[in-house]
């Protein structure tokens, strides 16, 4: 009996030690920052001056393929996992066409790397030709691996209004993900919110603290959840959802009384999002429980 107990304790210790050795690294490589978990590429944070905005791609899941997709012919403005906004003081910081508006990385510093998390600090300016910049933002991006079956991206962004800013009603606003077609509802996947509502018809325009999108690929179930922190302005923002794979908590599409969103010069908006790339469906990944942990985190 004693030998059995010792074996169980030793096995548990080995498992703990093995997982505790998970190492997350960030390294600049040209116009991107490569983030690896235990030496394997998880994602690139792309900050090219030739892109519309900084974004993450790929976002590799347990199958080692990306759970997100890049632009296609129908939706060339869907860039994997990104943050932007349309209809800002007459500019467009979302859709293709750099002359219409662009979110440009001014600096991207690696604050921490090589331990249990990687931390990136990224400062950006929103600008377009012939107009003063309406917004600057600062992003703190933290990548960690809370378990061997989950990798986490914390995306905290602080936006400062450099002038009075008017955002007209738009379905293109703020943090967004485009899931890979293999995992989309149209190909047998599942999109589900915190209330258990599934699919575009049931979730479109609904307020919910989180949304999970998952499906089966190469014999493995995997997916990606996006969570909104309760401290966010407009929390919980309604979701703009599509069965073909797009999902985004989008406050500017459902403004009160159908009015524009008006922000004054000097106003500061801080938004926090958590992305979980995971094995299994939302239940196996414990997304509801993960959100409970997230909402208790105050900073």
Image: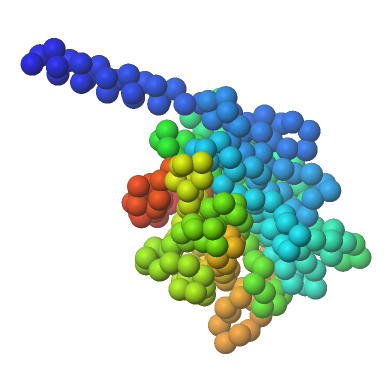
Q: Which one is in front, 143 or 147?
A: 147
Q: How many marks?
A: 0
Q: Which one is in front, 184 or 274?
A: 184
- Colouring used for the render: rainbow
Residue 126 position in % (x across, y down): 77, 58
4 w.r.t. 177: above or below: above
127 w.r.t. 255: above or below: above
Residue furthest to the top: 3
The residue at the point 51 percent across, 70 percent down is: 200
The residue at the point 72 percent across, 68 percent down is: 86
222 w.r.t. 194: above or below: above
Left or right of 236 in this view: 5: left
The residue at the point 54 percent across, 58 percent down is: 187
Residue furthest to the left: 1
The residue at the point 52 percent across, 33 percent down is: 117
Report if residue 71 is visible in the image: yes
Report if residue 109 is visible in the image: no
Residue 105 position in % (x across, y down): 76, 47
Residue furthest to the right: 130
Left or right of 102 in this view: 237: left
Residue 289 position in % (x across, y down): 33, 51
Q: Which one is in front, 41 or 146?
A: 41
Residue 73 position in % (x across, y down): 76, 60
Left or right of 198 in this view: 284: left
Q: Which one is in front, 199 or 130?
A: 199
Location of the N terminus (image quadrant): top left
């Amino acid at each position: 009996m004693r030998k059995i107990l010792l074996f169980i304790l030793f096995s548990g210790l080995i498992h703990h030690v093995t997982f505790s050795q998970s190492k997350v690294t960030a390294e600049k490589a040209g116009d991107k920052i490569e983030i690896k978990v235990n030496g394997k590429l998880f994602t690139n944070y792309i900050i090219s001056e030739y892109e519309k905005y900084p974004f993450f791609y790929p976002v590799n899941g347990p199958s080692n393929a990306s759970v997100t997709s890049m632009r296609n012919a129908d939706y060339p403005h869907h860039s994997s996992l990104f943050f932007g906004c349309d209809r800002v003081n007459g500019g467009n910081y979302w859709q293709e066409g750099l002359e219409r508006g662009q979110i440009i990385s001014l600096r991207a510093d690696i604050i921490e790397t090589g331990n249990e998390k990687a931390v990136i600090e990224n400062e950006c300016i929103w600008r377009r030709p012939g107009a003063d910049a309406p917004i600057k933002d600062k992003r703190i991006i933290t990548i960690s691996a809370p378990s061997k079956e989950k990798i986490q991206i914390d995306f905290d962004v602080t936006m400062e209004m450099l002038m009075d800013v008017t955002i007209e009603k738009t379905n293109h606003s703020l943090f967004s993900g485009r899931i890979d077609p293999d995992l989309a509802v149209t190909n047998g996947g599942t999109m589900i919110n915190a209330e258990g509502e599934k699919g575009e018809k049931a979730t479109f325009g609904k307020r919910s603290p989180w949304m999970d999108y998952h499906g089966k690929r190469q014999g493995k179930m995997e997916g990606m959840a996006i969570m909104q922190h309760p401290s966010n302005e407009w929390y919980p923002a309604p979701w703009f959802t599509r069965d073909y794979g797009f999902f985004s908590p989008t406050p500017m599409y459902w403004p009160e009384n159908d009015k524009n969103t008006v922000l004054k010069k000097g106003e500061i908006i801080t938004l926090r999002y958590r992305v979980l790339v995971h094995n299994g469906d939302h239940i196996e990944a414990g997304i509801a429980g993960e959100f409970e942990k997230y909402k208790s985190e105050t900073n």
